Image (cartoon, rainbow, N blue to C red):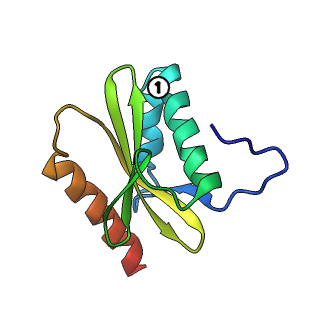
Amino acid sequence: MVKDEGKKPILNVAFYKTELDKEPVREWLKDLPKEDRQAIGEDIKTAQYGWPLGMPLIRKIERGLWEVRSSINAGIARVFFTVMDRTMILLHGFVKKSQKTPPNELDTARRRLNNIEKD
């Protein structure tokens, strides 16, 4: 946990928005139990105030794409994000059920990253 009294965040945090103004990560978080939301929120805040960070909290996936790795009651949550202009944009979140990240979860994050890189 990061002590942030009087300290400014290194990154701002924003949710990826679809063309229909939906925020898929925010909606996913709302469906999780409160304590899981809090754990993920703390991990995102740690990244926000301590950027750049590495394992075990943050793992680089590929150019422009990282994941926040959070332990929650249901297992392990992942939130894919990118950083643009000092803003951490939360692209996609899911609860991991297997050792390997499912390709469709990674594809969703890549597609959303491509959408904001085009803008």
Local crowd size for mark 1, using a 10 Å CA cut-off: few (<14), some (14–19), many (≥20): many
> How many numbered callouts?
1
Question: Looking at the image, which is closer to me, 119 or 73?
Answer: 73
Residue 47, image x, y percentages: 55, 51
Residue positioned most to the front:
55
11 lies left or right of 35: right
35 lies left or right of 58: right
Question: 18 above or below 30?
Answer: below
Q: Secondary structure at mark 1?
A: helix
Quarter of the figure that contains the C terminus = bottom left
Quarter of the figure that contains the N terminus = top right
Residue 11, image x, y percentages: 62, 61
Question: 56 above or below 91?
Answer: above
Question: Looking at the image, which is closer to me, 57 or 112?
Answer: 57
- The residue located at (40%, 62%) in the rendering is 19
62 lies left or right of 12: left
- The residue located at (33%, 72%) in the rendering is 63
Question: Looking at the image, which is closer to me, 3 or 119?
Answer: 3
Residue positioned most to the bottom:
118
- The residue located at (70%, 57%) in the rendering is 9
Question: 51 above or below 94?
Answer: below
Residue 20, image x, y percentages: 41, 57
- The residue located at (82%, 44%) in the rendering is 5
The amino acid type, in three-letter code, at marker 1 is Asp
Residue tagged by mark 1? 36
Residue 83, image x, y percentages: 49, 67
